[in-house]
Image (cartoon, grey):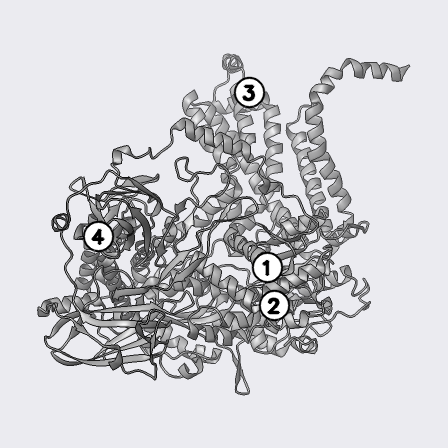
């Protein structure tokens, strides 16, 4: 829990050496792998009261749950390097990987052993579902529970061979701590890595028979896959099989989903005659411009020979045939008679040098920056000359060796890929060029520190930007041919006339497609959703299979690409019954103009409403009615870099006062704290301004709702703090991207939202494990800290004009149910992968989702502080006025009080105008009917709390 | 008798009417009817979701008496913008057209296309390019350039700072203002009978300047008029550029708020379409007044 962290420094979790450096160390010591095997019997594994069980086939296994530790001591005869092999079966239900850490003699030998991931196997439903236009829908994946034998390897996929571990002569203690997931352990042994055969030996191992058979396998017909996010996709090329003129057919393996480390896919096929076959893939490698991607091939679970590894596939804009070859002769693979399994594995080992080199460079550059800033301070005077080499005598040499390292990385890249211009090569060359200039004039470094490490185009940033690129190796597969000569294969590209003819047909048929001529059916509930195609398809599928079958009510869900369509549709009387996924500020504007139906009219609304945080309803309430229910939830979280804060010995702040206290230390090193008020738009929305006001207990409006109360003492205090942060405490005024600066480490702490969380999880591999989240700082009132934030995201509404309001509510009720939301979240993950994290607004469902459980707890706790700003007619002007106050005070140096007075006038005038418009007061200012302001107490009195 | 005669005349010329019919219909549907509806809407309260309510001249009263932003920011900005972009763009258009006319034909065609193309590229793509140049951090081209030359020590928020936004809007609009008016003027310059020049030189003309003032401009008055009107209309309508550059509507501190942006703010953000229609009518009036001025300056006495 974050409270326990407060006041102390964050413990370092990342101070193990890497396997790469450890291997170099072992090689230097001349340690050898030992060819001996020591089985570990399950009975001897001491653990926390878990028993041996028998599975359905009578085999014995040990059931291990997350959090449990197994340890075992064994006698080793020879000191040396060993590997670890285990047989297990996954018992996890969720998409979360099975993670464990391995300690040998109470020590984690290298970083990779602190987070070993055990692979799980997945498959997907074979039968194809169609949407109502006849397009194929991506099938859901399910886990296959099979016994897997696995030699512990690196979870980042940089090392193609199993991880070696050092054991002494004599008694060694091994302990395994299961971090996530659960498994049944069948077998465990300390063993050695057998050398792979050479191709020549492999050929001589079997009779040389080359059958004439030809087997074709569609790329999308997966037998097994290592990751649920690998999925099939659609390609409209004329020669792709199967081909469809108009419909979306899942006809290739989507390369973008088969591109990450440790991913593998498996195809199963029947061979009628045992013998040697060549293999040809029809692939699409158009994702990595002018670079190669690499794959390994396995047959029946084993890599057959050395040359079956590191098969390069070059860049090409179109489909190409790839036949793994050696000296221009196709490699032959032996398949036995009957069922065979062909595996294709993503191979990232080519990026090892690059990854390690860049990480080393980034570390050195950050260190150099800190060293320099210790001498020069944060502010650099351009007219002052430094004689840095007196203080840092090695600076010149260090810079030169960094420059040389970059130069050698360029050579590595060219040897694996090509010397043609690609994003990675360009970044490397650019950073070499800049680094050369910097290394030649070490004394000028303080003046050029922006170019070196801090600026967004600095060498550090350029290098950092390379990492996401080299972590991708996409490869789309249309079809595999086993046993065919490349000359007999069908042409890759359709002739010009064929393509032209298909283009003409598609053009004219597009006038008649149903997609744009979707007649309404009076029996069916019309739902418009403002979200991507994948989300909408899955919703329709769930509505059909779970809702319609149960209630017999038909629902038609359509994609609404633009919310503004709702206004026009409403004006034309063509609005749907329900709109989902619309921005949370919109329902109020629609409700005051009588376009939406009050959800409180439904009897069981209170029960439904209690699925959500009450604070979310404040901006959805108007005049004693609630006009929308939340669908997704946004969060504000404190993101921090454990490595940086730990190095600087900086505690996590719980209040804004504590933020002020850590600022001097951060700023001494050229770092800073980010608050969303510093985003690069000069319009500061409620998301950025209102949390401060709420935390101070300030008010935006007078009780009657007819005027603003910017001069409320607490509001003034909040505005004071907000502006002081920039005027006095020198927070950065404009930050282009907090996410990027957080990755580079010069904004190592700050407030971000849920999308930043997802981004960091999936797009920032270089700082994986180096960052964490905590509750946002707040204001202390009598010992409790108010950490209010604005979490408005998307909501669902029902239209007044709908004649199926009860059905509409019934559907929304079903949709927001905990089970439905969890199913939807899980299906998104299993169909599209872990980046499709569904931030449901249903609190209970959120806790039930597959998620890092500590993060889940932190987010859940932060959630209890959600407080969205109340809306009154004209409140957009209040938002603008707050933004103007901030800008006037921070940029133009206007006095806060003066600005408040001016802006209150503007905002009040607009509110009055709108209040007259909606009939609350007359033009003389007399109140015609009172405007009811929603409060949490009012919501509680309606039963929503 | 007279009526009969008229009817006869109409029948006589019915082929002519037939030929104008397609244009007449589209003009009616796409111009006349929307303008009339817009004028009617300006007399109503219309929030897009409910049926319009007639409220007389209230919108206009509010526009002139209570809309601070309109009087203090929008009108001054718009006039400043129009007065700078209109004449400078117009003058540049003429100058470039005349310069191009002096070039050999092939080169002229290529250059004309180059100069004309910015006005064709949609506002958004244009703004994307300019937004990179004027980006507020040190990766923006202009900032990087000035930082490298040590002219500034901190990146400047070009597009978010009220002091610079309007100037940048003017520069960007000028860059893209060589549109249809420029092409018309180019055609005008090229159409002038070369014998006129020869005759003038025989009569004692000595310089190129005399050529421009005594021959070129008088001979291409219709194109000059067309160019002037086009540039005026385009300038008044170019309001969206401020919102595109700064990425927000209203623009920071209303610094780049022009009539069109103000109109969009009311129409689509504040759901007050009746009031937005009133603003549109004011825009129409302004354009009309300015184009009358242009007619006075360039129009022939007979052809109006």
The residue under the point 28% across, 39% down is: A214
Q: Is residue A149 above or below residue A937?
A: above
Crowding at dot 3, Cα within 10 Å, few <14 / some 14-19 / many 20+, comes out as some
Residues under labels 2 and 1: Cα distance?
30 Å
Is label 2 in contact with label 3 (beta carbons under 8 Å)?
no
Query: Is residue A381 at all visible to an observer of this figure?
Result: no
In screen coordinates, is A198 left or right of A753? left
Q: Which residue is mark 4?
A: A309
Camera-nearest label, 3 or 1? 1
Q: Which residue is mark 2?
A: A899
The residue under the point 25% across, 53% down is: A298
Say which mark, if any, is on residue B215. 3
In screen coordinates, is A269 left or right of A20? right
Count how many numbered circles sit on residues in the image: 4
Is label 2 in contact with label 1 (beta carbons under 8 Å)?
no
Residues under labels 1 and 4: Cα distance?
49 Å
């Amino acid at each position: 829990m974050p409270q326990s962290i407060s006041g102390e420094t964050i413990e370092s979790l990342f101070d193990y050496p890497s396997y790469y450096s450890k291997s170099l160390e072992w090689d230097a010591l001349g340690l050898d792998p030992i060819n001996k095997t020591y089985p570990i019997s399950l009975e001897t594994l001491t653990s926390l009261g878990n028993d041996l069980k028998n599975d359905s086939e009578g085999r014995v296994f040990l059931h291990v749950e997350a959090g449990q530790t197994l340890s075992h001591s064994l006698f080793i005869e020879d000191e040396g390097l060993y590997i670890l092999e285990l047989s297990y079966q996954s018992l996890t239900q969720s998409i979360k990987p099975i993670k464990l850490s391995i300690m040998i003699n109470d020590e984690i030998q290298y970083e990779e052993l602190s987070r070993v991931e055990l692979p799980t196997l997945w498959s997907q439903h074979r039968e194809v579902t169609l949407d109502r236009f006849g397009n194929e829908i991506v099938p859901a994946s399910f886990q296959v529970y099979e016994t897997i034998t696995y030699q512990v390897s690196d979870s980042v996929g940089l090392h193609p061979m199993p991880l070696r571990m050092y054991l002494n002569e004599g008694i060694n203690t091994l302990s395994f701590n299961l971090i996530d997931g659960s498994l049944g352990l069948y077998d465990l042994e300390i063993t050695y890595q057998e050398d792979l055969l050479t191709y020549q030996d492999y050929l001589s191992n079997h009779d040389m028979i080359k059958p004439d058979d030809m087997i074709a396998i569609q790329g999308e017909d997966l037998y097994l896959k290592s990751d649920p996010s690998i999925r099939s996709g659609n390609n409209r090329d004329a020669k792709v099989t199967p081909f469809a003129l108009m419909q979306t057919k899942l006809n290739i393996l989507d390369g973008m989903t088969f591109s990450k480390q440790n991913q593998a896919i498996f195809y199963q096929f029947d061979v009628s005659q045992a013998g040697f076959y060549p293999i040809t893939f029809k692939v699409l490698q158009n994702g990595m411009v002018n670079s190669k991607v690499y794959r390994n091939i396995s047959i029946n679970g084993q890599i057959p020979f050395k040359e079956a590894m590191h098969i390069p596939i070059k860049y090409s804009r179109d489909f190409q045939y790839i036949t793994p070859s050696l000296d221009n002769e196709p490699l032959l693979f032996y398949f036995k008679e009957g069922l065979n399994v062909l595996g294709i594995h993503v191979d990232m080992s080519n990026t090892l040098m690059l990854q390690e080199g860049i990480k080393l460079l980034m570390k050195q550059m950050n260190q150099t920056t800190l060293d320099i800033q210790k001498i020069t301070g944060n502010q650099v005077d351009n007219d002052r000359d430094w004689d840095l080499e007196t203080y840092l005598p090695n600076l010149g040499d260090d810079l030169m060796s960094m420059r040389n390292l970059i130069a050698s990385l360029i050579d590595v890249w060219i040897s694996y890929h090509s010397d043609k211009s690609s994003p990675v090569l360009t970044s490397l060359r650019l950073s070499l060029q800049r680094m050369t200039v910097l290394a030649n004039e070490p004394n000028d470094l303080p003046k050029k520190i922006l170019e070196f490490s801090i600026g967004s185009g600095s060498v550090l940033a350029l290098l950092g930007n390379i990492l996401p690129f080299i972590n991708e190796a996409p490869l789309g597969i249309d079809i595999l041919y086993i046993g065919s000569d490349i000359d007999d294969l069908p042409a890759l590209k359709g002739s010009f006339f064929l393509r032209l003819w298909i283009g003409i047909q598609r053009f004219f048929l597009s006038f008649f497609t149903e997609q744009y001529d979707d007649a309404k059916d009076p029996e069916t509930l019309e739902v418009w959703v403002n979200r991507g195609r994948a989300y909408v398809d899955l919703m329709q599928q769930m509505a059909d299979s779970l809702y319609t079958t149960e209630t017999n009510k038909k629902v038609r869900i359509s994609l609404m690409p633009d919310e503004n369509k709702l206004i026009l549709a409403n004006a034309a009387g063509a609005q749907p019954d329900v709109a989902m996924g619309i921005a949370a500020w919109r329902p109020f504007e629609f409700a005051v103009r009588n376009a939406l139906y009050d959800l409180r009219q439904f009897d069981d609304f209170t029960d439904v409403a209690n699925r959500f945080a009450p604070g979310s309803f404040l901006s959805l309430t108007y005049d004693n009615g609630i006009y929308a229910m939340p669908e997704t939830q946004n969060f504000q979280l404190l993101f921090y870099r454990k490595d940086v804060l730990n190095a600087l010995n900086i505690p996590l702040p719980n209040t804004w006062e504590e933020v002020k206290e850590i600022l001097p230390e951060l700023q001494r090193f050229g770092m800073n704290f980010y608050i969303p008020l510093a985003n690069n738009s000069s319009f500061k929305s409620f998301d950025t301004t209102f949390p401060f006001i709420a935390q101070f207990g300030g008010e935006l409006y007078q009780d009657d709702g007819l005027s603003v109360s910017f001069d409320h003492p607490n509001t003034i205090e909040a505005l004071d703090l907000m502006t002081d942060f920039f005027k006095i405490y020198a927070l950065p005024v404009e930050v282009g991207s907090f996410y990027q600066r957080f990755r580079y480490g010069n904004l190592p702490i700050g407030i971000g939202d849920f999308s930043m969380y997802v981004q960091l999880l999936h797009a920032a591999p270089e700082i994986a494990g180096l960052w964490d989240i905590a509750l946002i700082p707040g204001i202390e009132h009598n010992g409790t800290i108010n950490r209010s934030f604005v979490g408005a995201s998307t909501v669902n509404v029902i239209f007044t004009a709908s004649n199926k309001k009860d059905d509409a509510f019934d559907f929304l009720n079903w949709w927001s149910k905990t089970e439905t939301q969890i199913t939807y979240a899980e299906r998104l993950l299993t169909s599209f992968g872990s980046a499709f994290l569904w931030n449901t607004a249903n609190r209970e469902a959120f806790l039930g989702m597959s998620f890092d459980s500590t993060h889940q707890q932190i987010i859940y706790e932060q959630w209890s502080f959600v407080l969205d700003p109340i809306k009154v007619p004209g409140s957009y002007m209040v938002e603008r006025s707050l933004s103007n106050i901030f800008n006037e005070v921070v940029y133009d140096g206007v006095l806060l009080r003066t600005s408040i007075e001016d802006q209150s006038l503007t905002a009040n005038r607009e509110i009055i105008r709108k209040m007259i418009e909606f009939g609350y007061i007359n033009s003389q200012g007399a109140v015609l009917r009172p405007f009811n302001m929603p409060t949490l107490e009012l919501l509680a009195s309606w039963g929503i709390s | 008798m007279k009526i009969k005669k008229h009817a006869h005349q109409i029948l006589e010329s019915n082929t002519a009417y037939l030929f104008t019919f397609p244009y007449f219909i589209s003009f009616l549907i796409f111009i006349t009817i929307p303008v009339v509806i817009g004028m009617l809407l300006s007399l109503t309260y219309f929030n897009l979701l409910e049926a319009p309510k007639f409220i007389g001249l209230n919108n206009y009263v509010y526009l002139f008496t209570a809309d601070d932003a309109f009087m203090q920011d929008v009108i001054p900005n718009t006039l400043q913008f129009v007065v700078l972009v209109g004449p400078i763009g117009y003058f540049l258009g003429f100058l470039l057209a005349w310069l191009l006319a002096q070039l050999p034909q092939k080169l002229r065609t290529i250059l004309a296309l180059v100069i004309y193309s910015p006005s064709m590229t949609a506002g958004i793509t244009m703004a994307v390019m300019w937004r990179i140049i004027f980006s507020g951090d040190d990766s923006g081209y202009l900032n990087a350039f000035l930082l490298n030359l040590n002219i500034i020590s901190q990146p400047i928020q070009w597009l978010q700072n009220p002091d610079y936004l309007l100037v940048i809007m003017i520069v960007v609009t000028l860059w893209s203002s060589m549109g249809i008016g420029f092409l018309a003027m180019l055609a005008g310059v090229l159409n002038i009978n070369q014998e006129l020049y020869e005759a003038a030189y025989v009569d004692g003309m000595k310089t190129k300047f005399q050529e421009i003032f005594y021959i070129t401009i008088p001979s291409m008055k219709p194109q000059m008029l067309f160019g002037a009107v086009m540039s005026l209309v385009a300038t008044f309508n170019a309001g969206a550029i401020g919102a595109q550059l700064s990425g927000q509507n209203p623009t920071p501190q209303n610094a780049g708020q022009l009539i069109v942006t103000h109109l969009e703010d009311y129409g689509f953000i504040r759901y007050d379409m009746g009031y937005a229609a009133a603003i549109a009518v004011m825009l129409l009036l302004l354009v009309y007044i300015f184009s009358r001025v242009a007619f006075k300056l360039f129009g022939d006495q007979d052809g109006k």
